[in-house]
Amino acid sequence: MRPRRFALAAALAMSGCLAVACGGGSDSGGEANGGGAAGAAAKPLIGVDYPRSDTDFWNSYISYVPKFADEQQSELKTTNSQNDIAKLTANVQSLMSQGVKGVVMAPQDTAAVAPTLQQLEAKKIPAVLVDTRPDTGNAFMVVRADNRAYGEKACKFLGEKLSGKGKVVMLEGDLASINGRDRTEAFNECMKANYPGITVFGEATNWDGALASQKLQTRLTANPDIKGVYMESSFALAGTLQLLKQRDLLVPPGDPKHVFVISNDGIPEELKDIAAGNIDATVSQPADLYAKYALMYAKAAIEGKTFQPGATDHDSTIIQVRPGLLEDQLSAPLVTADGGTYGGVPSVKHDDKSLWGNNLN
């Protein structure tokens, strides 16, 4: 990852003005276009709903939000929906009543958030979504990494480590979330296409660590020859390692009994576990950049700016998901012990200083 700047590089030109993001000025490529009379105050009031505070990843995101709000000179009103769509709906209504000019949120149920997006659009309050993309409805911008790439990177890492043969367990996230669906579908499709000799046991866990541990234990009992585990998030990290230790399987990678484990998130604990040989890889989901660019886009929307699909100057690409919805797909590298390339996928070493998990204070 290289240093990020806030301006977006010019890219693919599109005709007309994009839904929700229209605000004034003429569109001419990937640059943000300034608004006219809709300019915002020096410190716009932005409402941020935190999706939950029961995981290391989201607690890290929560710690970054006020730091970047100060850096970007924005005022904040915050709420926490605790993984409950009803609370999210109520929280957004509360934020609207408090006069916020833009809303940043990370709905975990990507189907049920549509009415909330409609309410915001009706009030002309721009919405920026973090980590998840709504199944339907418009937003000013989605700030997210390519979650299908998460599944593909995990597939190729395990496929190469297992030399294309054996059994693996995939501890899936919530399939009501597009993230859970993207990671699951991509992992399965990649395995089928590239490593047909590997049997995948998919276990739905609803992002619940206790449930994940229970299902992994059942699978290991029935299939003691399982040699790989893909955790779609670090929610399952502690339970997985505890279970492997109980079964005398938490051994160094060179030991024949070693079970190869890959996660998604890039929290500090995962990086330490890679260094210790407890797990083998993760995909670093950018908690810091989620906060940074979500607030940047919210402020830009309040100021009447617009964006276009194309390459950015912060190592990402804006894509048009559908009319009325753009997504900035941030970089999320594979992280390993050796920084090697697996199935054509390059990785960075666990101690690389560019990883947010190595820079969290």
Image (cartoon, grey):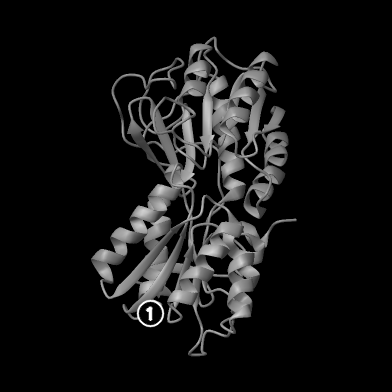
Residue 105 picture location, percent across and down: 58, 33
Q: Residue at (56%, 32%) from the top-left corner?
A: 85
Q: Is residue 88 left or right of residue 263?
A: right
Residue 102 picture location, percent across and down: 59, 22
Q: Which residue is mark 1?
A: 162
Q: Residues within 10 Å of mark 1 (few under 14, many from 20)?
A: some
Q: Is residue 271 left or right of residue 8?
A: right
Q: How many discs mark residues in the rendered view?
A: 1
Q: Residue at (54%, 35%) from the top-left corner?
A: 107
Q: Is residue 215 above or below residue 227?
A: above
Dot 1 falls on a residue whose secondary structure is: loop
Q: Is residue 94 above or below residue 145?
A: above
Q: Residue at (62%, 48%) from the top-left corner?
A: 288
Q: Is residue 277 left or right of residue 229?
A: right
Using the rendered image of the protein, determine whether residue 188 is visible from the camera's viewpoint. yes
Work out which residue is located at the far right of the displayed protein and give it. Answer: 361
Residue 193 appears in which quarter of the rendering? bottom left
Q: Is residue 234 above or below residue 95?
A: below
Name the quarter where the C terminus is drawn: bottom right
